[in-house]
Image (cartoon, rainbow, N blue to C red):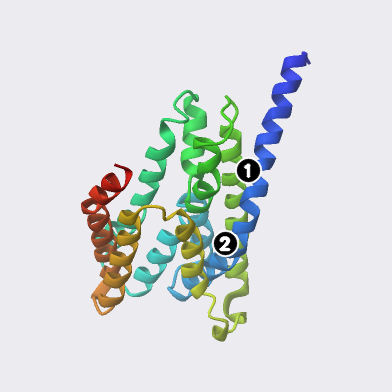
Amino acid sequence: MRRWDFLEAASRRTEFWAGVRVELPLLLGVLPFGLVYGLLGLQAGLPAWAVVAMSSVVFGGASQVVFAQLWGAQVPPSLIVGTVGVVNLRHALYSASVAVLLRELPLRWKLLLAYLLTDEAYMAAVGRLSVGPQGPLRHWFLFGTGITLWLTWQLATLGGVLAGAVIPAAWSLDFSIALTFIALLVPGLRRRSELLAVLVAGVTALAAQALPFKLWIVLAAAAGMTAGMLARRWDTKGRA
């Protein structure tokens, strides 16, 4: 192996393991999240193999939980697809955020990282990608965060399916889903428009709980995004 090949391999390992280490603290919320999804999937009437397979095929924690809840409520398939699609729109925003930073990568890398780009992986890696030391191998950092999350999610889902009804309902593990997203969201709130978007979405979600078919999710997301877009002028005035 030539000297520069060795140095490049070492740099890849350095970036990869740095991504793994940054992701590890977030797994404290991912593990119970995956357990809850496994339990909800079974309770909704999905076969065990489908619950586990969805974690590999879809790999979108919140959308998988929403799918299981709507399936259990016997919501029409068209509405399930629409609601899950709205919940997953945030992944398009993540992709747009990092696309310009990773535009030089070959297609195989873009496809792999797009598949692994979920909430926790993005939040752990975006700082390194956008403001960290620049270099041609920094995508290995995102790969480290993403594959660590992927492996943990598969194991947690399998654990939830195997646990079945063994875990007492009194543990209220489903609340860990909300805690996970709160922990991801709050540190990233830096603009007044972002804070307003969160507040509007939260108030809307609470006020619309009585809507059928979990439509409060769609309504709260739309209200929050609209409020944030309308309030962007506050951020512009603040910078001025």
Q: Is residue 226 above or below residue 11?
A: below
Task: Give the spatial CA distance, label 1 vs label 2.
Answer: 16 Å
Q: Three-letter amino acid code at disc 2? A: Val
Q: Position of residue 219 (x, y in %)?
A: 24, 65
Q: Position of residue 3 (x, y in %)?
A: 77, 15
Residue 75, visible in the rendered structure: no
Per the image, label 2 sits on a secondary structure element best described as: helix
Q: Residue at label 1?
A: 19
- Give the crowd class for mark 1: few <14, some 14-19, many >=20 residues within 10 Å: many
Q: Three-letter amino acid code at disc 1? A: Gly
Q: Position of residue 12 (x, y in %)?
A: 67, 30
Q: Residue at label 2?
A: 30
Pick the front one: 157 or 19: 19
| Residue in view at x 29 percent, y 72 percent | 203
- In the rendered view of the protein, which quadrant contains the C terminus? top left
Q: Earlier in the sequence, mark 1 or mark 2?
A: 1
Q: Position of residue 137 (x, y in %)?
A: 60, 28
Pick the front one: 174 or 238: 238
| Residue in view at x 26 percent, y 70 percent | 204
Q: Is residue 164 above or below residue 33?
A: below
Residue 230, visible in the rendered structure: yes
Image-based side of 227 in relation to 23, left or right: left
